[in-house]
Amino acid sequence: MSHRPFPGRRSVLRGSLAASAALSLPTALGAAPAFARSGRPRAGWGVQAGDVTCDSGLVWVRSDRPARMIVETSATESFRNPRRWHGPLLGPGTDFTGTTPLRGLPSGEQIHYRVLLADPDDPRRTGEPVTGSFRTASAKRRDGVRFVWSGDLAGQGWGINPDLGGYRIYEAMGALDPDFFLCSGDNIYADGPLTETVALPGGRTWRNITTQEKAKVAETLAEFRGNFRYNLLDENLRAFNARVPSIIQWDDHEVTNNWYPGEILGDTRYTEKNVDVLASRARQAFSEYFPISTLRRPGGRVHRVQHHGPLLDVFVLDMRTYRNANSTDDQPTDPQGILGREQLEWLKRELARSRAVWKVIASDMPIGLVVPDTGDSKPNIEAVAQGDPGQPLGRELQIAELLRFVKHRRITGTVWLTADVHYTSAQHYQPSKAAFTDFEPFWEFVSGPLNAGAFPANTLDGTFGPDRVFLKAPTTANVSPADGYQFFGEVDIDGGSGELTVRLREQDGTVLFTQVLQPGRVGQ
């Protein structure tokens, strides 16, 4: 693959050091911006780029006070003859965050950018620029594509541990020079408060960086915002964001565990019991803290397709917003299912339109692993599979409809990627082993968590004939990141042969499993 180099280390370090300097101030640790603070606006939370295509991308920043966002781009890190983009006015309505769209960019090129924050009353007064870089998708197949994916950050009481160097997995992912990072959900744990210390086996102690917003479950908009800010305290994450663009989806913990629309919580930790109210606040904070193209539009949504040149389309699903209530999931008809009818029809339509060699279905939940909803006294189901290995029931009916559609429309190169279950595995689904047989074989790869508790493997459901080809998981629940079992996956598409290689990796980048897939096959 002819990947272009990272931006110069000096460029990245300048941005990182500026962020580190700002975050060393006590007021930056989750506090609201100080209007009376003298000086110039500061971008202490770093920069991010997201939803990058062949000719466009989004750049994100957060200010410490009201400011006008300005982005300058250049083909070199010297920023000679930069192109200037005037962004939004950042204020309290968006928690001082903002996103600027960049359009008309050259394809397959390294784009160096810097964000300046200008005083709204005196545009000549700008803060220290914060720099970043990303590579636009190439319109030339020969350039290939490489990306990484994972999910689940700061879960089960395991936050930023300074003794371990924080979120070190981002350093390992960045070392692979990916074109982008796909986060498969659970970007925060709004329902997971952090304590300063946690006892570990063997007399050891885990230490967390803590903030006010992480001391309780998130209910107010300010608390949800504070949860997203918390992760940006980590230097590894900020440095990664400055050089690797993202494609972000959400799952349950951006709101609360195993949530569904219309739910009324029985959890005594919450004073606001209406999940729809919590989800609305979480959605606003989510849209403020990530650069996501579709959330900026009227009636914004999380599900979308990201076109990444001739080799790859990424179909980002939303298995939260439109799902029905968690239940035993064994009903013989289920028109709403886990996607909702509108999203399912959208997915079928976009898959049929796609001309990309590979069609990655970014699913925030696995489809053949039984994920129970343990928050209820009833044996409810949280994901798709319910443990009955027979013909599709409940939410499986939508997946069966989709798989049948892929087969009969002769759609090639579909691969499913997910996280959610806090271990890593590879499942090959085969009609010869399934109760439902009207589909072509395909692969589902699981990887995660980024920094959260690790858990034993979930039971397989035989409806779609999954064969677990690889698995690495602990045998006990909620194993801390200090004891390993943190994972991410890599996808590498060769520009010459079109082969897609999946590598499942440990936290330090060690390869655990490799699978090479050939292009041009229905399903895969």
Image: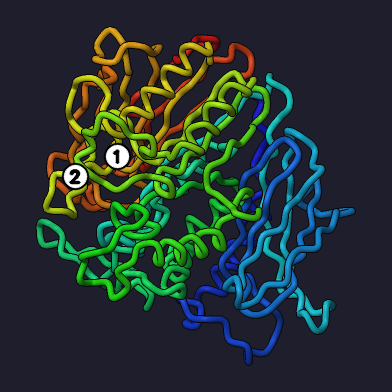
Between the residue at mark 1 and the residue at mark 2, the CA separation in whole angstroms equals 10 Å
Of the numbered discs in the image, which one, if any, rests on residue 380? Answer: 2
The front one of 401 and 99 is: 401
Of the numbered discs in the image, which one, if any, rests on residue 30? Answer: none
Residue that extends furthest to the top in the rendered view of this protein: 432
In this rendering, the label closer to the viewer, 1 or 2: 2
Amino acid type for the residue under numbered disc 2: Asn
Please determine whether, in this image, residue 497 is positioned above or below residue 282: above
Residue at 27 percent across and 72 percent down: it is: 270
Q: Quadrant of the N terminus?
A: top right
> Which quarter of the picture shows residue 15?
bottom right
User: Picture coordinates of residue 67 (x, y %)?
Assistant: 71, 76
Amino acid type for the residue under numbered disc 1: Ala
Q: Secondary structure at mark 2?
A: strand
Q: Secondary structure at mark 1?
A: loop
Residue at 20 percent across and 20 percent down: it is: 390
Q: Are marks 1 and 2 in contact (CB under 8 Å)?
A: no
User: Picture coordinates of residue 411 (x, y %)?
Assistant: 53, 15
Of the numbered discs in the image, which one, if any, rests on residue 383? Answer: 1
Q: Is residue 336 left or right of residue 179?
A: left
